[in-house]
Amino acid sequence: MQKGKLVVYTGYSGVGKGTIMKELLRLDDSIRLSVSCTTRSPREGEREGIEYYFVDKERFEQLIEDDGFLEYAQFCDNYYGTPEKAVDEMLEKGLNVFLEIEVQGGMQVMEKRPDCVSIFITPPSFEELEKRLRGRGTEDEATILKRLSRAKEEKEFEKYYTHKVLNDEPSRAAREIIDIIHS
Ligand code: 5GP
């Protein structure tokens, strides 16, 4: 069986990656989303093993030592990482596996797996990004400011991604991404 594609899927906090991802999963049954480990606390409604595996710092550091991650990074005071074994098992089954990860992790994956597809989701503008981040109401003011300043740093990494997709409308962006991964 032909192996699936590994897709590095990145975009600033608040850009709408999650909404596009829901569309992708609804429209294309070859797509799977890798579930990451994080030391961040669950947001309301987030479930263990669905959005993330929520672990403490000691457990995360043990997993780093055991070489369990395809990539990992620190983002705004927390660790985030992709469990490698689960990803490879899905790829072997011919599934297209999306890693919804930030730029430091994205760069690690591009280096380790040069055959991956890299996609960066961009907002119509930074003003629009701020509006969306505030509008979703999941973060306090200090966290919002940290995430906006982080977005400006992440902009430097956009150029390393092969595909940039504008999130002007989530279902349109999802269709563009489906075309990219099947081309
Ligand atoms: P959030 O706290 O909003 O869920 O995620 C914060 C950032 O971490 C987002 O940009 C998200 O894509 C990224 N992220 C989530 N999981 C991983 C991961 O496993 N590795 C890396 N490097 N980034 C991740």
Image (tube, helix red, strand yellow):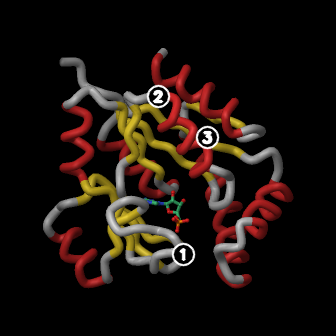
Seen at 31% across and 38% down, the residue is: 113
53 lies above or below 173? below
Which residue is at the front of the view, 169 or 39? 169
Rendering coords of residue 98 (x, y %) = 42, 41
Q: Choose top left, top right, bottom left or bottom right for residue 30.
A: top left
Judging from the image, what secondary structure is the residue with disc 2 in?
loop
Three-letter amino acid code at disc 2?
Asp
Query: In percent of the image, x 71 and y 73: which residue is there?
Result: 137
The answer to whether residue 135 is left or right of residue 117 is right
Q: Is residue 148 above or below residue 10?
A: below
- Depth check, mark 3 against mark 1: the one in front is 1
Q: Which mark is residue 6?
A: none
Q: Which residue is mark 1?
A: 44
Q: Residues within 10 Å of mark 1 (few under 14, many from 20)?
A: few
On the image, the x and y values in percent for residue 126 come to 81, 56
> In 3D space, how far apart are the residues under numbered discs 3 and 1 (Cα atoms)?
34 Å
Q: x, y percentage for residue 38?
A: 38, 70
**SS for callout 3:** helix
User: 10 Å neighbourhood of mark 2: few (<14), some, or many (≥20)?
Assistant: few
Residue 54 in the image: above or below residue 72: below
The 10 Å Cα crowd at callout 3, few under 14, some 14 to 19, many 20 or more, is few
> What residue did someone put label 3 on?
159
Amino acid type, callout 3: Lys
Residue situated furthest top in the rendering: 183
Question: How far separated are the C-alphas under marks 3 and 2?
Answer: 27 Å
Determine which residue is flagged by label 2.
28
Foreground mark, 3 or 2? Answer: 2
Measure the C-alpha gap from mark 2 to mark 1.
Answer: 27 Å
Q: Amino acid at mark 1?
A: Glu
